[in-house]
Amino acid sequence: MKIESLNAWLPNQKPGSPLVIAGPCSAESEEQMLRTAHALKEISEVSVFRAGIWKPRTRPNNFEGLGEIALPWLMEVKKQTGLKVTTEVATAKHVELCLKAGVDILWIGARTTANPFSVQEIADALKGVDIPVMIKNPINADLQLWIGALERLNLAGITKLMAIHRGFSVGEKLEFRNDPLWKIPMELKVKFPDLPLLCDPSHITGKRELIQQVCQKAMDLDYNGLIIETHPDPDKAWSDASQQVTPSTLASIISSLAIKKESS
Ligand code: PEP
Ligand code: MN
């Protein structure tokens, strides 16, 4: 795979510090997004704002995202804060709407990565487009599916690729919501040393109290960054309430981390 380094396209990223992406699991209102983003802007390490607009859920009757109406709110975050913005895409239509709106970075979620036809549809919609794409590991513990999704995007010409480790659903009740199975992302890192690897401690743990320890483990393993769900009032969040942290908790988590200086 031909992959561009993070610094080639994120010139403001300080070498040696992790890329930090933060923001709510889901876009709930313009006010919620702007309030979160303005607080995150004060944390110097945060350079990208995340918010889910389309939310593929495992079972019906859960909140599946506000959809298209939230896209202008994301762009308002970008305009007011200067943060880059990212959201999840699961179909070609989502890609088209995001490209039209000017979203900076796209991500493919764990349920979509597990479906090669959906990944291919997204890849086809991105042919000839120069945009960074982050690919979460598939929901199940299958490294080949993860690699396959990265390859599909790369074959479509996407070279600003990143992998996100969000843990694996193993069908057992664990302390963590998803089993991290650290060996799998480590195998990916060995196979593709140029591919930036981010950790998503929010979906790994499912519990805000456990996020710091998983972030530290990721830093010890030389991950290139973190994506952490952040909400102004986590207990009231419309999705993933128990794993979201406030911007001020996020700031303490980040400042508590021991970061290897040679990582990039
Ligand atoms: C999310 O990032 O909010 C999300 C739904 O993630 P995943 O695809 O990892 O479950
Ligand atoms: Mn979430």
Image (cartoon, helix red, strand yellow):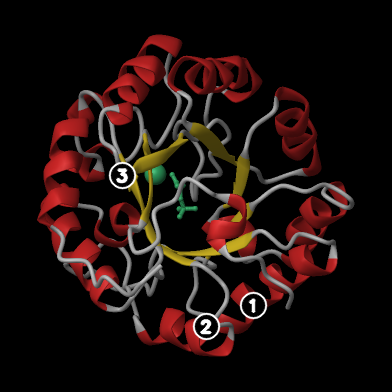
Q: Nearer the viewer, residue 212 or 222?
A: 222
Marks 2 and 1, how far apart in space? 8 Å
Q: Nearer the viewer, residue 217 or 17?
A: 17
Does label 2 or label 3 sit earlier along the sequence? 3
Horizontal and vertical percent position of residue 141: 48, 78
Disc 2 marks which residue? Answer: 188
Question: Marks 2 and 1: CB-CB under 8 Å?
Answer: yes
Question: Marks 2 and 3: CB-CB under 8 Å?
Answer: no
Q: Does label 3 point to a residue whose CB lies under 8 Å from ligand 1?
A: no
Disc 3 marks which residue? Answer: 45
Does label 1 or label 3 sit earlier along the sequence? 3
Q: Does label 1 point to a residue whose CB lies under 8 Å from ligand 1?
A: no
Secondary structure state at the residue bearing disc 1: helix
Quarter of the C terminus within the rendering: bottom left
Identify residue type, mark 3: Glu
Q: Is residue 167 placed above or below 109 in the rendered structure?
A: below
Disc 1 marks which residue? Answer: 147
Which residue is rendered at x = 61% and y = 43% of the image? Answer: 105
Secondary structure state at the residue bearing disc 3: loop
Instruction: Tell me if mark 3 has few (under 14), some (14-19) or many (20+) residues whose alpha carbon lies within 10 angstroms of its own.
Output: some
Marks 1 and 3, how far apart in space? 29 Å
Horizontal and vertical percent position of residue 210: 14, 58
